[in-house]
Image: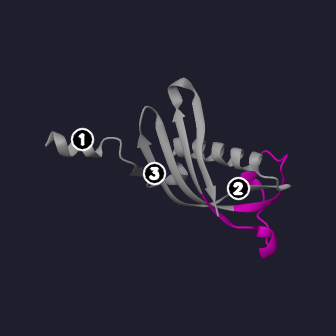
């Protein structure tokens, strides 16, 4: 029986309620800050929808997220992106699906974007 349990330890687990998961939301906010910083777009982007989210307990916590990102009407200098409207016109909206992997060690106050892959 101990062997069966061994395989489950450290396996990624689905996060059922992504909107109410504080750790996930922090990781997602960090990933979007990095995404916007790396982008050469004059507009900021924000998460439109969380497609899937998983948490993996390793020597910290790894968040594996698949999200839909949309371009907002706010310039990059904006701070509160959730209140920024998304572009309406299809050529400006630029909906993108991104896979982010964020690694956190909350007790050491560490956070790192390990993977950012957008299409």
SS label for mark 3: strand
Q: Position of residue 63 (x, y in %)?
A: 50, 45
- Disc nearer the start of the sequence (3/1): 1
Quarter assignment of residue 72:
bottom right
Q: Which residue is mark 3?
A: 54
For the point 75% across and 54% down, which residue is it? 83
SS label for mark 1: helix
Direction from residue 52 to residue 71 in the image, left or right: right
Residue 30 in view: yes
Q: Position of residue 22 (x, y in %)?
A: 54, 42
User: Looking at this rendering, what residue extends furthest in the bottom direction?
Assistant: 90
Number of the label disc, if any, that sits on residue 99: none
User: How far apart are the alpha carbons under marks 1 and 2?
Assistant: 38 Å
Q: Which residue is mark 2?
A: 46
Q: Is residue 96 magenta?
A: yes
| Residues rendered magenta in the picture | 70-98
Q: Which residue is mark 1?
A: 6
Direction from residue 8 to residue 79 in the image, left or right: right
In contact (CB < 8 Å): disc 1 and disc 2: no
Q: Is residue 22 above or below residue 19?
A: above
In contact (CB < 8 Å): disc 3 and disc 1: no
Q: Position of residue 59 (x, y in %)?
A: 43, 31
For the point 76% across and 61% down, which residue is it? 71
Categorize mark 3 by other alpha carbons within 10 Å: few (<14), some (14-19), many (20+).
Answer: some
């Amino acid at each position: 029986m101990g062997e069966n349990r061994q395989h489950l330890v450290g396996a990624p687990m689905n996060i059922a309620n992504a909107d109410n998961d504080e750790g996930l939301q922090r990781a997602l906010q960090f990933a979007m800050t990095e995404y916007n910083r790396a982008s050469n777009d004059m507009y900021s982007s924000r998460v439109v929808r969380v497609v899937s989210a998983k948490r993996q307990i390793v020597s910290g916590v790894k968040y594996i997220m698949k999200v839909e990102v949309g371009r907002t009407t706010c310039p990059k200098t904006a701070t509160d992106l959730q209140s920024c409207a998304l572009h309406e016109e299809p050529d400006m909206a630029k909906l993108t699906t991104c896979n982010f992997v964020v690694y956190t060690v909350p007790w050491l106050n560490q956070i790192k974007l390990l993977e950012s892959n957008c299409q």
